[in-house]
């Protein structure tokens, strides 16, 4: 029967506009050809009256009969389904022995007095209330009044780590998106990096990761990046810590430069941040002292004049590099 009535599908606003336009064209002038009875006329008038509402709504519900109405986001979000480790509170009027809290087992079951083990896996609150009502009606109560409340949502959680106000596990209620979760966690801290990493487990057991630009998501407001979260997602906001670069010798402001690890400058930029070369600087003899992964110190000699003239590429510095600008002898 459900198939005969047409399967409901969500379409975006662009498709909805096209559909409405098609419907209007189907009943356009000349009326004597397109509208053959009063039903057709009513359809035409209804579409004209609903046009402003339909074109400004974001979600439409369609059946084979056409547009049946505008659905709210809440209506389109599936109701929460009970899973392992959830904590349920059961109330049955006139049956006090059942009135307490029950933790759902890893197998998705709860153990009730008189009724024994009851499978709750994948049921909504309403479905579980109906199931318990039927079980109680069979043996104990003529007209059971059953209420189920989900006190703790343990089976649908996401995990937020890194540079946010309050990292930790968060219950995934309804349709939760990335921005909503970050806001719920108190936002990003000043140490947050330029990317957010989402690690997600696929149905086949493998894991995948997605990197999202903080600038595009938050500063530019790219709504396509505010993705819906799924149970067991791990959202990592890497800490972009401050590191040091040292510039000494013939520059106007020698000293240590504190920069973000994701934004370590090149040699030319570091010299510029140190106030530029002094009049006595030997631009052709700049040395970068660097300690590699093994702890060994190496020296890299650079002719900065060649970089300025475009004869060679600028040198990307690394954490704790020391730049020594030698003095020019006349």
Image (tube, helix red, strand yellow):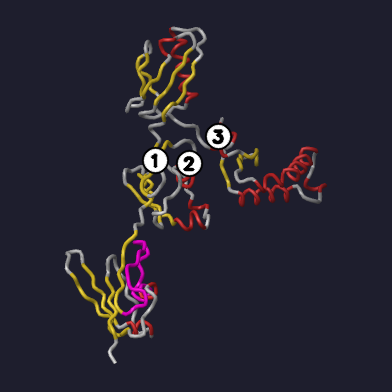
Give the label on residue 35, or none. none
**What secondary structure is marked by label 3?**
helix
Q: Position of residue 243 (x, y in %)?
A: 32, 62
**What secondary structure is marked by label 1?**
strand
**What secondary structure is marked by label 2?**
loop
**Which quadrant would the N terminus be assigned to in this image?**
top right
Q: Residue at x 65, y 50 (%)?
A: 17
Crowd around label 3: few <14 · some 14–19 · many ≥20 (10 Å): few
Crowd around label 2: few <14 · some 14–19 · many ≥20 (10 Å): some
Q: Is 274 located above or below residue 18 in the figure?
A: below
Q: In this rendering, which labeled residue sits more in front, label 3 or label 2? A: 2
Q: Look at the image and say whether residue 262 sits in the magenta stretch.
A: yes
Q: Look at the image and say whether residue 235 sits in the magenta stretch.
A: no
Tags 1 and 2 touching, CB below 8 Å: yes
User: What is the span of residues highlighted in magenta in the rendered image?
Assistant: 250-270
Q: Residue at x 39, y 72 (%)?
A: 273
Q: Quadrant of residue 152?
A: top left
How many numbered badges does the structure rendering display? 3
Give the label on residue 3, or none. 3
Q: Residue at x 27, y 69 (%)?
A: 321
Q: Mark 3 or 1 closer to N-term?
A: 3
Name the residue beneath numbered marker 1: 158
Q: Is 271 located above or below residue 264 in the figure?
A: below
Q: Mark 1 or 2 closer to N-term?
A: 1
Q: Is residue 303 left or right of residue 97?
A: left
Q: Position of residue 298 (x, y in %)?
A: 20, 73
Q: In this rendering, which labeled residue sits more in front, label 3 or label 1? A: 1
Name the residue beneath numbered marker 2: 176
């Amino acid at each position: 029967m459900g198939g005969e009535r047409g399967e409901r599908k969500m379409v975006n606003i662009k498709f909805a506009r096209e559909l409405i336009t098609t419907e209007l064209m189907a009943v356009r002038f000349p009326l004597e050809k397109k509208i053959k009875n009063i039903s057709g006329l009513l359809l035409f008038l209804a579409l004209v009256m609903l046009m402003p509402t339909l074109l400004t709504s974001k979600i439409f519900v369609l059946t084979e009969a056409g547009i049946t109405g505008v659905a709210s986001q809440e209506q389109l979000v599936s109701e929460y389904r009970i899973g392992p480790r959830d904590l349920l509170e059961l109330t049955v009027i006139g049956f006090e022995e059942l009135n307490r809290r029950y933790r759902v087992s890893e197998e998705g079951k709860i153990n009730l007095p008189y009724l024994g083990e009851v499978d709750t896996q994948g049921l909504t609150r309403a479905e579980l209330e109906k199931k318990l009502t039927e079980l109680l009606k069979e043996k104990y109560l003529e007209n059971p009044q059953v209420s189920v409340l989900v006190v703790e949502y343990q089976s649908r959680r996401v995990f937020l780590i890194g540079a946010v106000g309050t990292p930790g596990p968060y219950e995934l209620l309804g349709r939760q998106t990335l921005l909503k979760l970050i806001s719920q966690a108190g936002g990003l801290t000043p140490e947050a990096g330029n990317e957010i990493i989402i690690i997600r487990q696929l149905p086949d057991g493998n894991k995948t990761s997605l990197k999202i630009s903080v600038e595009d998501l938050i500063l530019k407001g790219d709504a396509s990046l505010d993705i819906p979260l799924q149970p067991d997602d791990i959202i990592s906001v890497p800490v972009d810590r401050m590191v040091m670069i040292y510039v000494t010798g013939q520059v106007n402001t020698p000293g240590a430069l504190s920069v973000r690890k994701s934004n370590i400058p090149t040699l030319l930029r570091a010299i510029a941040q140190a106030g530029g070369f002094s009049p006595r600087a030997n631009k052709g003899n700049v040395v970068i002292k660097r300690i590699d992964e093994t702890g060994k110190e190496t020296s890299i000699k650079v002719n900065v004049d060649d970089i300025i003239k475009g004869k060679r590429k600028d040198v990307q510095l690394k954490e704790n590099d020391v730049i020594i600008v030698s003095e020019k002898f006349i």
